[in-house]
Image: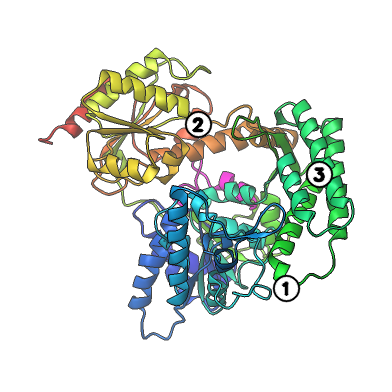
């Protein structure tokens, strides 16, 4: 893998590398990245991997090559909201009228916010990083009291604390570093949205690349409702002397009425009233922006800039939504008591922008444990902006010239240190009825209980919905009371994971965050249950739009979108079982379509090559042997 990455960087060819857990893939791309003569960015999807790189892998590598004359400087770069903001801590934050407020929230939250403020001041005094990851324990709401987004930031030039700013110091360090570690979202904002966030670089390594399309989509998605518009109007009243802010407030009322009259879901064509309301918001926001004075006194810079930025956001989002172009998907989510309805707009596809704005400009190495879907790289490569006809052979130099129209790429699978055929069983419960719309049926619940009982706990249940996970947990608690059964939502995920690891007679049931974010090697997890093939929901506005667009383009939308999405999640879910060379266990899929449907072969080819069976008695016996103390 290291040789393949080195070649890609030297020859400016894109590379896809599938590297299973335990292959040491981070070192395999870090070594050639340090040897490369220009700056390289490493982008990850999760904080866990970012910590592993910065706290363990890179320092070990730097120590190993000491004295060889290499530039081993490195830095971490995150979005501004990941750093404490000294201006917000010392000067306060504008309220809805734009006045700076220093009030601390009441109750328990006040104690935590004061603790965070004291920590940030100590970080400034000691020239620390001010990163959220190293702050005292807190929740999202508490952290928002001591941080700002990039939209609310004054900028180093205007901020009275710009010289001490943690985010600015991080950028300055990155400017001096050969290797920059960041996340997918910041990379997307910099390379694809065109907002400069990262110092100039020559190449990028994207780890956890199976997550990239979702993260790029997320970074390019905007939301709006009437409350956002009302807030912009309130903040503007202090700075705008005419009636423009009141007109913006009236536009917010019109948007609220239009959203009440509209039905939740995707809009093929915008309802006339909703379109007119968005145009009204857009025009009122534009007029309000024009009415802001050109200059403002230094003492009001924070409130002024943040109020104007709020209106700017409203204008840009309303303009995008009102246009409702073929390149975007627009929908309205259904609101509730605590979460009002919101309008959402997301890009129909991101492979085009990634190809035009990232792949054409930089050399990119994509790596993950799951890049070959259906046994091939083409599905993932296409979603990233690379074409099957541009693939080159590893055994010869490229016959394709890299131009704006042709982007050569190579796909490499470096294998795994695990013997999946001996370490794991893939059990497809072919005898069960296909899953229905009403959730788990009696047959599926009986199967879950029998498998968990045979494993004596040690089971991780991955479910397609929170309702299914909770229903399964309730039945297992009732029928197997001697086991500890946990369901996602019973506590924070780190607490659940810790309890799961510490007690082998524990069952943990949950949804998507468990599919991809849990690493539990050893006897803790000997059974991974998957209730159904994780196809996207039929009413998912973005996925259904992408599927329809693929059909219109002459492709197979189901296979290109729904089956590819399912294959990726299945591979990630199955990958929770075997994490070391000594792990043993069963992946049990309770959806017979994996064995009976035509698309089942594609999905099976996306999974680790475990020993397959559809015999429930064989699986239960294997689990009992694994859970036996004498094994």
Q: Position of residue 266 (x, y in %)?
A: 72, 31
Label 1 or label 2, whichever comes before in sequence order: 1
Task: Name the residue located 53 percent from the left edge and 70 percent from the top edge.
Answer: 166
Residue beneath disc 1 = 298
For disc 2, the marked residue is 534
Give whichever of 96, 605 is nearer the camera. 96
Q: Residues within 10 Å of mark 1 (few under 14, many from 20)?
A: few
Picture layout, residue 80 above or below residue 212: below
Kindly report which numbered mark, 1 or 2, lies closer to the viewer in this rendering. Answer: 1
In this rendered view, identify the residue nearer to me: 559 or 269. 269
**Number of marks drawn:** 3
Does the rendering let one see residue 548? yes
Q: Is residue 296 above or below residue 326?
A: below
Tell me the distance, in whole angstroms, between the alpha carbons under discs 2 and 3.
43 Å
**Element on which disc 1 rests:** helix
Residue 272 vs residue 429: left or right?
right
Instruction: Classify mark 3: helix, strand or loop.
Output: helix
Q: Select label 2 or label 3 by which is in front.
A: 3
608 magenta-colored? no
Question: What secondary structure is the stretch in magenta mostly built from?
Answer: loop
| Tag of residue 249 | 3
Range drawn in magenta: 368-387
């Amino acid at each position: 893998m290291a040789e393949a990455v080195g070649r890609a960087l030297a020859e400016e060819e894109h590379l896809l590398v599938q590297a299973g857990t335990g292959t040491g893939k981070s070192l395999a791309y870090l070594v050639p990245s340090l040897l490369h003569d220009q700056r390289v960015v490493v982008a990850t999807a999760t904080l866990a991997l970012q910590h592993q790189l910065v706290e363990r892998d890179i320092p070990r590598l730097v120590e190993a090559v000491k004295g060889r004359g290499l530039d081993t400087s490195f830095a971490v770069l995150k979005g501004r909201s990941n750093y404490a903001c000294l201006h917000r801590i010392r000067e306060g934050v504008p309220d809805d009228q734009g006045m700076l407020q220093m009030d601390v929230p009441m109750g328990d939250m006040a104690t935590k916010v004061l603790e965070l403020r004291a920590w940030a001041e100590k970080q400034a005094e000691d020239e620390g990083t001010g990163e959220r990851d190293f702050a005292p324990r807190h929740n999202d709401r508490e952290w928002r009291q001591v941080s700002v987004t990039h939209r609310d930031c004054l900028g180093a030039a205007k901020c009275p604390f710009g010289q001490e700013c943690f985010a600015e110091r991080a950028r300055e360090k990155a400017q001096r570093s050969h290797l920059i570690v960041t996340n997918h979202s910041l990379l997307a904002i910099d390379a694809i949205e065109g907002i400069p966030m990262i110092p100039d670089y020559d190449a990028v390594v994207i780890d956890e690349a199976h997550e990239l399309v979702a993260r790029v989509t997320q970074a390019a998605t905007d939301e709006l409702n009437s409350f956002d518009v009302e807030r912009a109007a309130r903040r503007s009243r202090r700075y705008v002397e005419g009636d423009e802010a009141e007109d913006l407030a009236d536009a917010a009322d019109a948007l609220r009425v239009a959203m009440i009259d509209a039905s939740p879901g995707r809009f093929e064509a915008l309802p006339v009233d909703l379109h007119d309301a968005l145009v009204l918001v857009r025009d009122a926001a534009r007029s309000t922006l024009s009415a802001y004075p050109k200059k403002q006194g230094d003492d009001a810079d924070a409130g002024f800039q943040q109020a104007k930025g709020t209106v700017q956001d409203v204008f840009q989002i309303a303009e995008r939504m009102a246009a409702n172009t073929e390149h975007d998907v627009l929908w309205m989510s259904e609101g509730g008591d605590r979460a009002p309805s919101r309008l959402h707009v997301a890009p129909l596809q991101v492979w085009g922008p990634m190809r035009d704005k990232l792949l054409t400009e930089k050399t990119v190495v994509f790596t993950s444990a799951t890049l070959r879907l259906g046994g091939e790289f083409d599905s993932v490569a296409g979603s990233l902006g690379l074409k099957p006809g541009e693939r080159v052979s590893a055994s010869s130099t490229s016959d394709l010239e890299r131009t704006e129209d042709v982007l050569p790429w190579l796909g490499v699978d470096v294998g795994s240190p695990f013997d999946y055929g001996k370490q794991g069983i893939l059990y497809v419960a072919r005898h069960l009825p296909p899953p229905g719309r009403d959730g788990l049926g009696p047959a599926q619940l009986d199967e879950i209980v029998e498998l968990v009982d045979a494993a004596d706990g040690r089971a991780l249940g991955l479910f397609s919905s929170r309702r299914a996970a909770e229903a399964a947990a309730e039945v297992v608690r009732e029928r197997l009371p001697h086991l500890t059964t946990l369901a996602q939502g019973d506590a924070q995920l780190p607490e659940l994971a810790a309890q799961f690891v510490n007690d082998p007679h524990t069952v943990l049931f949950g949804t998507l965050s468990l599919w991809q974010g849990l690493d539990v090697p050893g006897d803790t997890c000997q059974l991974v249950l998957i209730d159904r093939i994780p196809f996207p929901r039929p009413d998912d506005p973005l996925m259904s739009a992408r599927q329809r667009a693929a059909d219109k383009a002459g492709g197979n939308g189901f296979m290109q979108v729904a089956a590819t999405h399912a294959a990726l999640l299945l591979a990630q879910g199955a990958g929770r079982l075997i994490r070391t060379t000594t792990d043993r266990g069963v992946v049990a899929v309770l959806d017979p379509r994996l064995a009976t449907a035509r698309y089942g072969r594609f999905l099976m080819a996306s999974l680790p090559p475990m020993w397959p069976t559809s015999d429930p008695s064989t699986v239960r016996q294997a689990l009992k042997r694994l859970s036996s103390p004498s094994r």
